[in-house]
Image (cartoon, coloured by chain):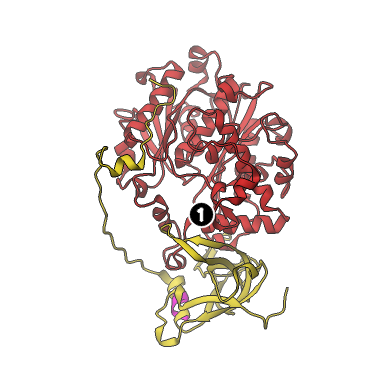
Amino acid sequence: MAKRRVAVIGAGMTRFMHRALETPKELAWHAAHAALTSSQLKLKQIDCVVLGTAPDAFDGVHMKSEYLADGCGGWGKPFLRCYVGGGTGVYAVAQAYFQVASGIFDTALVVCEEKMSSCQPHPQAAFLTIFDPITEQPLKPNLLWIFALEQTRYMETYGITIEEIARVAVKNKRNALNHPAAQLSAELTVEDVLASEIMAWPVHRLMVSPTSDGAAAIVIAAEEVARRVSDKPIWIQGIGWSLDSAYWTNRDLAYPEYVEKAAWMAYQMAGVKEPRKEIHIAEPYDPFAYKELHHLEGLQLAPKGEAPRLLADGVFERDGDLPVTPSGGLLGVGNPIAAAGMMKICELFWQMRGEAGKRQLPGKPERGVAQAWGDLMQVGTVVVMGTEKPD
Amino acid sequence: MPKFPGTPVDNRELKRGKIFTASYAPRLRYRWDTGEAIGRYLEELKRGRLIARRCDGCRRVLIPPRMFCERCFRPTNEWVYVKDTGRVLTFSLCYVTWNVRRLRQPLIPAVIEINGASPGMGILHLVSKVLPKRVRVGMPVRAVWRAAPQRRGSITDILYWRPDTGQEQK
């Protein structure tokens, strides 16, 4: 059976907040409702519902997919939850794509929700159990360790300076100033970033995304439906994902090979041969400042070790050759884990429809890539979207 | 309804009880079996030694040891003792504990490449007895063990890794 063409026809999201008054279910409902409104479909026209959400431990609610199902519009419909750590927000789009591209369903609502603030005193503690229970947990690791260890390795391998890394935080928090849903937008200098508290050298506080509450959603549809209901469908041209080994201390952390594999899977599906020329906007995962650069290299949008130089040259600014994270990213808009990846998908949708408001990029971008990442530095998820219908 | 719905809450409002919440502190306990490979690894740690497994498929000496090679997807072949010395592959100076308490003196988590295992084969551990600003990638280090009677078959039977001036620089 041939794959069918699939397009995104609606997107919506809540504000991203340190702590939301709304329950997880209410957040999911707000995002789902906004995405449906944007698509001009009613819930009864949705064939299946896909939810992406991170560990139950944040919420302290077991089987939170069932808990969230009604907020996602999932009752009485084929409903599934997918989860690949921080990579979930982008992977959920791939999961929904399978349902529609396969011909089983014509439409799908994809909702990603996270409420991290419930976990007390800080959701960081819920991360302890992602480490190996026997060989690592007794050392009392925290999540900052793995990022700091990876950043050190990245900087050491390619001779990258801390100032070069800090520029990412400056750019993304500035881009977020124009995002009405943003939690941590700011006009900062490299000096401000480097003057912020050192959490885990070489990671400073302003290089770390916040913990957040929020939700984001899209509606996707098969070609026949998309053409009928939407004047500006944004096509899903390619999807890719890949997982590396959980023996993360046995890998060279300087380069994310799994992101490269995921990216080529998506590019090949999209018919992209030269990503540097054929991708107009990128929304790589930026939970920490260096990660954006690291991921741009994995996404083949910069040669290994050279993303910092391209950033310093202005290539990744809003008016540069390849605008990167025009949304403001996790560093600026916020990081409700699964919803953060989905926010990046929403951004590509709005940018390519010309609906990004004050953030609208010049030059009518026609193709973009969004990427998310997670688990123990081991999963890469990639979606390529564009205004042109895929072959 | 606003285009981007959501109602931020100020923590102070929570503390003043202006917003109703409910709370729960789960008390769960787990006892994990350590399995064939890590069981032996812990047994050797108790004896003050590090042990790895060799895979005849890719010829890697794997640490932490495992009974199957995830790359070749076949059983590993042999137990191999490796040294309790190595080099720092990467490190951090961490000023925050796992539950986000601040530390005045940083912990120094590191990935330590183990001498005798394949290149790039590291384990997660802590470096100590060195000025934080003197730690370097590539620095030779040596395990400092707990006294034998206090060892109990845990990764913490190694207290930390200290600079090892006896080893030549790579």
Q: Is residue A349 left or right of residue A96?
A: right
Q: Is residue A242 left or right of residue A17?
A: right
Q: Which residues are magenta?
A: B40-44
Say how many tags the image has.
Answer: 1
Q: Quadrant of residue A105?
A: top left
Q: State the quadrant of the C terminus of chain B.
A: bottom right
Magenta-drawn stretch contains A380: no
**What percent of the width, then of the height, locates residue A387?**
61, 21
**What percent of the width, then of the height, locates residue B132?**
60, 68
Give me the residue at 55% from left, 25% from top.
A349
Q: Is residue A225 above or below residue A259?
A: above
Determine which residue is flagged by label 1: A376
**What percent of the width, then of the height, locates residue A211?**
44, 44
Q: Is residue A107 above or below residue A50?
A: above
The majority secondary structure of the magenta stretch comes to helix
Q: Quadrant of residue A278?
A: top right
Residue A219 in sight from this viewpoint: no
Front in this rendered view, residue B101 or A70: B101
Q: State the quadrant of the N terminus of chain B.
A: top left
User: Which one of the lettered chains is coloured yellow?
Assistant: B
* Tag 1: amino acid: Leu
Query: SS class of the residue under badge 1?
Result: loop
Q: Quadrant of residue A30?
A: top left
Q: Is residue A74 above or below residue A291?
A: above
User: Which one of the lettered chains is coloured red?
Assistant: A
**What percent of the width, then of the height, locates residue A4?**
53, 25
